[in-house]
Image (cartoon, grey):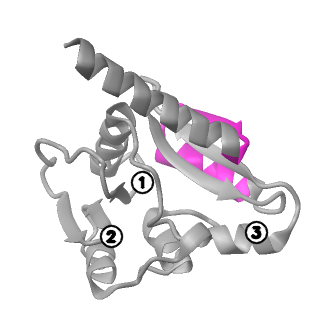
Amino acid sequence: MKGGLLSPLDTLPEPATDLAAQLAAVADPASAKRAMFLAQGSPQPAGLPPGVTASTRPEGTLLTADPERALAYRRGDLTDEGMARLLGYPESKRAVLEAGGTPVVVQGVARNGGVVHAGLASPAGLADAVQAARAAAPGGRVAIATPQAAVLGRLRGLLGEINQRRRS
């Protein structure tokens, strides 16, 4: 199900460094990150850590070690709210936009700089979003950005990887 602006399924592919950081967090028992979503066009990991499975649908792939999340994804809980639950976001995009105010993107960033967690947050949900990001990236840091800056950062990462492949 494609849901337009509010759908987490209409996301840009992510840089490989961010995907590697996310996969490491999904496999790390110290991290609260239980699942990650690979948007269409994202590079697929060469291998999965023990216990992590891939559930693929036309919309993309969910990687998780949690059988309940994998089942919910395969069954089609692909609403904005459903994907927020699967990915550990305290608020869905729809809830953030309906809350009013100026939304921000709260990122949990691993020690190596990879973005482990990036969730949209309303002003009222900011504290919960910071807690979720911190729990997803233990030992890392939390960063807050405008939605535009977060998208620009992702695009810069992708462009850097494309340019690096061209030089190789």
| First to last magenta residue range | 127-147
Q: What residue appears at the point 41 percent right and 33 percent down from the top-left corner?
A: 158
Residue at the extreme front: 166
Is residue 146 highlighted in magenta?
yes
Which amino acid type corresponds to the residue marked 1 in the rendered image? Lys
Residue 47 falls left or right of residue 77: left
User: What residue does disc 2 label?
Assistant: 59
Residue receiving disc 3? 97
The answer for how far apart the CA atoms under marks 3 and 2 are is: 23 Å
Question: Does dot 1 land on a helix, a strand or a loop?
Answer: loop
Q: How crowded is mark 3: few (under 14 residues within 10 Å), some or many (20 or more)?
A: some
**What residue type is disc 3 on?**
Leu
Q: Position of residue 154 (x, y in %)?
A: 50, 37
Task: Spot the residue most to the bottom.
Answer: 75
Q: Is residue 81 visible?
A: yes
Q: Is mark 2 on a helix, strand or loop?
A: loop
Dot 2: few (<14), some (14–19), or many (≥20) neighbours within 10 Å?
some
Query: Can I make out residue 109 in this image?
Result: no
